[in-house]
Image (cartoon, helix red, strand yellow):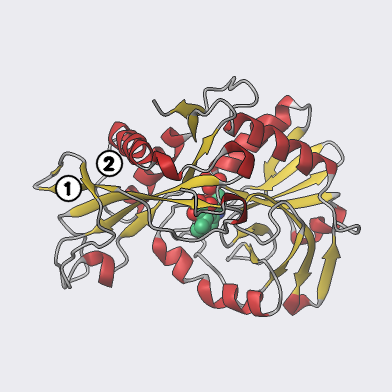
Amino acid sequence: MENINWSDLSFGYMKTDYNVRCYYRDGKWGELEVSSSEIINIHMAATCLHYGQESFEGLKAFRGKDGKIRVFRMDENAKRMQSSSHGIKMAELPVEKFEEAVRKVVKLNERFVPPYESGAALYIRPLMIGMGAQVGVRPASEYMFMVFVTPVGPYFKGGFKPSKVCIMRSYDRAAPQGTGTIKVGGNYAASLVAGEKAHELGYAAVLYLDPKEKKYVDECGPANFFGIRGNSYITPQSHSILPSITNKSLQQLATDMGLTVERRAVPVEEIATFDEAAECGTAAVIAPISQIDDLDANKSYVIAKDGKPGPVCEKLYNKLRAIQYGDEPDVYNWVTVIE
Ligand code: PLP
Ligand code: COI
């Protein structure tokens, strides 16, 4: 792998050696298959192409100082994928099968797991699609589950450097009682116009408000949101945000550090009182927010005046990374070593 510049990786696709696949036919899941092709063959009337029967996941594998490869909380991703399946009427994949696929694909692509020193990771992308041909709006009877991997660096330019995000009140990524709580492609399609607009204006991401009342903070396009005020870790509770595994982990770590965790509706104006704010997710890890511009309301919240990450974000970031890379004990059994 001498020609990969591990420390300069961005969050993008790179071909690796193998992917794994599994098909649901006649009411049951088959055996895992290994493929070296990047191409899949699907029927033109497959429901994923017409009616959005697609869900995906995102998790990471890390190489430790000891050379071992660790995958973070894959059981949680497996369960969330089941909840996505449930939400758009796809077949549910057993947790064990999901975990077996992740172990297999990481092992087969071991040479693409970045070295410890690089700070990069192997991104694991499981996805499920409706494969059966259907013209009426109905769920497919056949599904394909697959997992590919690709080595990645930071999702946001600069990594752990604060960036600006914006609120755009004329866009929603999910409906109040819709699919925001599951990880389906449609949510991301719905976020593309606002996302590109935000990028053109120089923002790292859009911070969405609750779609019903536009009074409360929901989450960012690809990550959850949290704020720090004094000794509190404050993060939105909402019917339209994805339950982030990173956020859930940070809430535990924050509690362990003696912070009070508040998971509740967060009024937009409350942002003005935060000492720190950040996006969090598998790809984003913790991406501190320096400023939030509420574009339609002509309001600006400056959070990191000195342009540096706040001390609590930094502590949480270091703690989370230390567990993921195996530098600190894994007291909650969050990590699976790939043998
Ligand atoms: N919110 C959205 C919309 C996401 O796409 C993601 C990424 O998976 C997250 C939050 C963060 O979730 P997690 O920490 O499980 O990666
Ligand atoms: C992740 O954090 O894994 C995500 O899926 C976010 C984004 C790349 C969609």
Q: Which residue is mark 1?
A: 24
Q: Position of residue 125 (x, y in %)?
A: 40, 50
Instruction: Left or right? Give the position of 105 relative to 249.
Output: left
> CB of mark 2 within 8 Å of CB of mark 1?
yes
Q: Is 52 or 335 nearer to us in this picture?
A: 335
Which quadrant holds residue 329? top right
Whether the residue carrying mark 2 lies under 8 Å from ligand 1 is answered with no
- Residue 312 got which mark? none
Residue 99 locus on image (x, y percent): 35, 34
**Residue at horizontal 52%, vertical 61%?**
176
**Count of picture labels:** 2
Mark 2, residue position: 93
Judge left or right: residue 242 versus residue 26: right
Q: Is residue 16 left or right of residue 221?
A: left
Q: Amino acid at mark 2?
A: Leu
Residue 219 drawn at (x, y percent): 62, 57
- Residue type (three-letter) at the residue carrying disc 1: Tyr
Residue most extreme to the front:
2
Quarter of the view holding residue 325: top right
Asked whether 146 or 245 is in front, the reply is 146
Identify the mark nearer the N-term, 2 or 1: 1
SS for dot 2: loop
Q: Tell me if residue 61 can be seen.
A: yes
Quick one: which residue is furthest to the right in this view? 306
* SS at mark 1 in the image: strand
**Residue at the (78%, 27%) spot, across then down:** 258
Crowding near pointer 2: few (<14 within 10 Å), some, many (20+)?
Answer: many
